[in-house]
Image (cartoon, coloured by chain):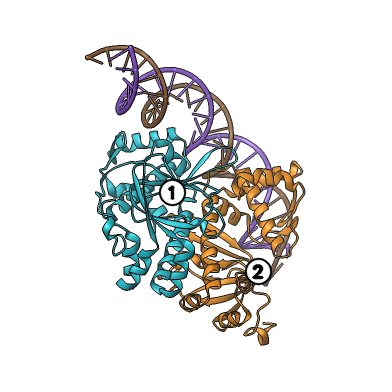
Chain colours: A cyan, B orange, C purple, D brown
Amino acid sequence: MADDGDELTFCSTCAFSQACLAEGMDKRSLMDLHVLVEHVGPFHAGEHIFREGDPFEAIAAVRAGTVKTYMIDRDGREHVLGFHLPGEVIGLDAIDGETYPCNAVALDTAMLCRFSFPKIAVLATKLPGLQRHLFRLLSRDIGRAALLAGDWSADQRMAAFLIGLSRRLAARGFSAHRFQLTMARTDIANYLRLAPETVSRVLRRFQKDGLLMVDRREVELLDRDQLAALADPILHR
Amino acid sequence: MADDGDELTFCSTCAFSQACLAEGMDKRSLMDLHVLVEHVGPFHAGEHIFREGDPFEAIAAVRAGTVKTYMIDRDGREHVLGFHLPGEVIGLDAIDGETYPCNAVALDTAMLCRFSFPKIAVLATKLPGLQRHLFRLLSRDIGRAALLAGDWSADQRMAAFLIGLSRRLAARGFSAHRFQLTMARTDIANYLRLAPETVSRVLRRFQKDGLLMVDRREVELLDRDQLAALADPILHR
DNA sequence: CGGATCATTGAGATTTATCAACACTAGTGG
DNA sequence: CCACTAGTGTTGATAAATCTCAATGATCCG
């Protein structure tokens, strides 16, 4: 880790802390928070951060890289719950239970901050800003999960996926119109509840229609407006 | 309200309080909780508890009746987010935001307990049991929303819907194998992301195959095992 | 009774999945 | 440097599930 020396004072790469600051926490409180942070990683592509059934003790904020969360159903099919970019938090769905309900795997080289949940919960009773932030994070995920649940067309889903990704990347300072897909087509398919072939075909058609350029895993959004219009009913809030 | 005199001491009909007790709260704390509870209702079928865009200030526990939460998308289609039975809490998806992101409407005569969210959050800093309960409620909804999102067949969805309803009713002391559907077919369809016609056909076929009897809105589950087997990959946890 | 709402049924259209084959890429080792 | 291979992605043909549209039927409530 490059910034070992700083990790107990201020972790500039950890968006979790920054968000807490925004919720009204002072720097003194932030240091309380950082005492219970554990920097973990790097995890290399394919390495698991946790697996379904592992005892739950911590949530984690992605600091770098991409993390995929997924479940395997009784029929052996993979269901991707989400792709998590730097600044986003995983493990929230495990709070209600003894174990993680899903798996989390790194798609590229990923670094995380682990927060012991029992400890952060105790701290949250002392720091209203932290509690509020946690409530918000949880609440946001409810809404996010509900959105994907709608019966949208393949085109709408794909557009929403790309626009959503673009916005989240932009919020982290990356380019909003040109980026790498860190996940395989199959992962996108399992996330959007489509067949991989359908993902392929939709991307191809989007390219033919001038909405984007796609080369292997490199994507460039050309007609953001039209994509956003497609995605609109899904992302609408 | 029948139990006006008791509502500041103990609200036996409010499962929210009971769950908090189970999380380790003592009776003294429970009274703190009840000071900020507001019993609202009855709402009659079709009356709204809140609407999308209303300023968010409170979550609410259903005490009696059924509440449907839903959104209308840009194309004017209704998306049902959930049906909420006594003991279940609505409004959690509004915590991250200034306003409710969805509508909540009574399907039959419904009574609720409103909890001012700012107040309950403050109280939660003093009562760890309450904070834990809230975290769990939120976390549970994330998992629940993710489940419905899968690409399941119409049969699986319908079976999961019925078995899920049956279990929740049973948990509240109602019959697990014979109950009333308080929602219209269209509501079920919008919840399961199916066409109303498909709902009708699946129910009819289930009846033909001896899985259940359905008459108008009255349902009797005859072969719970087979329905549960169908629903299994969806409900699997 | 009459109208409105809700539910059912059938026929055909549409979307997406499935199956099978092929292409491309990157990495490996001869 | 060139096969070779494994993994990944693409493409086409066909099939299956579900939707849509249209019509009919049932129930409730004034």
Q: Residues within 10 Å of mark 1 (few under 14, many from 20)?
A: many
Q: Quadrant of the C terminus of chain A?
A: bottom left
> Do the residues at discs 1 and 2 belong to one chain?
no
The mark lying in front, picked from 1 and 2, is: 1
Q: Position of residue A185 (x, y in %)?
A: 40, 36
Residue A187 place in picture, x, y as percent: 43, 39
Q: Give the image quarter of residue B16.
A: bottom right
Rendering coords of residue A72 (x, y %) = 54, 42
Looking at the picture, which amino acid does disc 2 mark? Gly
Q: What SS does tag 1 mark?
A: strand
Task: Give the amino acid type for the residue marked by disc 1 in the picture.
Answer: Gly
Label 2: element kind: loop
Quickly name the residue at label 2: B65
- Toward the bottom, the furthest residue is B5
Residue pointed to by mark 1: A82
Mark 1–mark 2 Cα distance, whole angstroms, equals 34 Å
Q: Position of residue A169 (x, y in %)?
A: 30, 51
> A197 above or below B231?
above
Choose between A215 and B211: the one closer to the eye: A215
Residue B169 seen in this snapshot = yes
Q: Please say if A207 is above or below A40.
A: above
Q: Residue at x 67, y 75 (%)?
A: B13
